[in-house]
Amino acid sequence: MHTWDQKQAIYQQLADILAAQLLDGEPAEGDAMPSVRALAGRYLLNPLTVNRALQALGDEGLLENHRGMGLYVVAGARERLRAAERQRFMNDEWPRLRERLRRLGIQANQLNWEEQA
Amino acid sequence: MNAATDTTGRTTATSLAGASGSDLLVEARNLSVRFGKKAAVDDVSFTIPKGRVVGLLGHNGAGKTTLMKAMVGLTRPEGALHVLGLDPVKQRVQLLESACYIPDVATLPRWARVEELITMMSGLHPRFSADRARTLLRRTSVGLRDKVKSLSKGMVAQAHLSLIAAIDAKLMILDEPTLGLDVLSRKAFYEMLIDEWCDGERSVLISTHQIEEIENLLSDVLMLNEGKLVLNLSLEDLDRRFVALSHDSSVADQMAAAHPLLKYRTGPGPGGNASLFDGAPPEHVQALGQRVRPSLVDLFVALTRKPELNRTQF
């Protein structure tokens, strides 16, 4: 069963999981999101919690309500998510990573940018 | 749920009797069930509105099964109890048209085939849908031609839920539905319950000891300790009312001085300490730790400990 972090609201954690899946194209832009009940069943969460997570993704402009047909992934959702992730990397992760690289004395040209064979 | 209890606590008996059209599926006021001198359920008041998933928690012998039995008219309580606006003892037949119940001792006849059970239910229950039962069973690995005795324990539980969830009811009462099932069977059971039965209108009351597993499934919690209701709260209000602080062992004494309900461990090392408070502790205490979500298990331990354990636990 899924284990949830005690430090963060569960709806936020679910929203993060669903956002990560959207970034991977699951579901693809223009496709329908799974129903609240299906998600509640899959993650064993109260439907109200699932609703809040979907609401949060809707507020970020990633999902839209098609009248009577449920929630759909909006066109451009992946690019928007990628931009937000990039922003977060630059603001939060990169300064820490740069600090560590400096401490270890690793230069940019020593980093292998090609994938290992 | 708490707010509903506060308001209905002041309503009159006549308005309780006319509750069938309201949003409250269950209304219990000053409810007791006595066996001789012992009160198995002791002066309990609560309500269950529609569209809720309510957990009924308590140790063995806390009164969970007795309370559920009273709700379906299997035991006669004192005080006021209305389920779907009906008196469970006097109007039991009418009640069972719209309330379904899997008791903790439930079994299905071992010699029967699943399709025979569907036929039987069709004859027994006016609101049972054979088509719906077959649809639900298709989610499971249970075949219509299977005999009950050939099914695993987890499959029997799923077959049972399929039969019960095929009743077009407003309230489902499940007494320890996943007892003795392995983790995958338990997950499958709850997945089907949430996906196929909870539609925002119907409510379900579940008793279980596997609190961690269903904690996040619940909208509300009722906690019984020796027959008394020690907690009656929505999970949303629970997060607001109870404050858990994770902290370092070096500040343990200062935490203890603020009288937490419970001190417990969240992980290894000196940082893995936590204290649970009913209501926010003073700010200087809050500043010593990091706020974490209080878990239902910790609350359960804090609110249902036997007094003699208080001295030896830490």
Image (cartoon, helix red, strand yellow):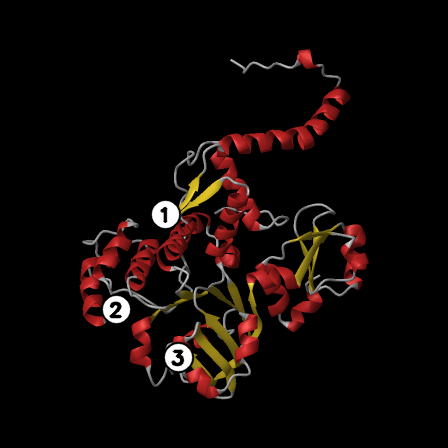
Image spot of residue B94 (x, y percent): 30, 79
Q: Does the rendering let one see residue B78?
A: no
Please tell me the numbered disc located at residue B85.
3
Q: Do discs 3 and 2 share a chain?
A: yes
Q: Which residue is mark 2?
A: B127
Q: CA distance from mark 1 to mark 3?
A: 35 Å
Outermost residue to the front: A67
Task: Give me the residue at 33% from left, 83% from top.
Answer: B91
* Residue type pointed to by label 3: Gly
Q: Is residue B306 left or right of residue A66?
A: right
Please tell me the numbered disc located at residue A57.
none
Image spot of residue A59 (x, y percent): 54, 45
Q: Is residue B132 left or right of residue A103?
A: left
Task: Give me the residue at 56% from left, 71% from top.
Answer: B2
Q: Is residue B302 left or right of residue B5?
A: right
Which residue is nearer to you in this view: B227 or A33?
A: A33
* Residue type pointed to by label 2: Arg
Residue at mark 3: chain: B
Q: Which residue is mark 1?
A: A69
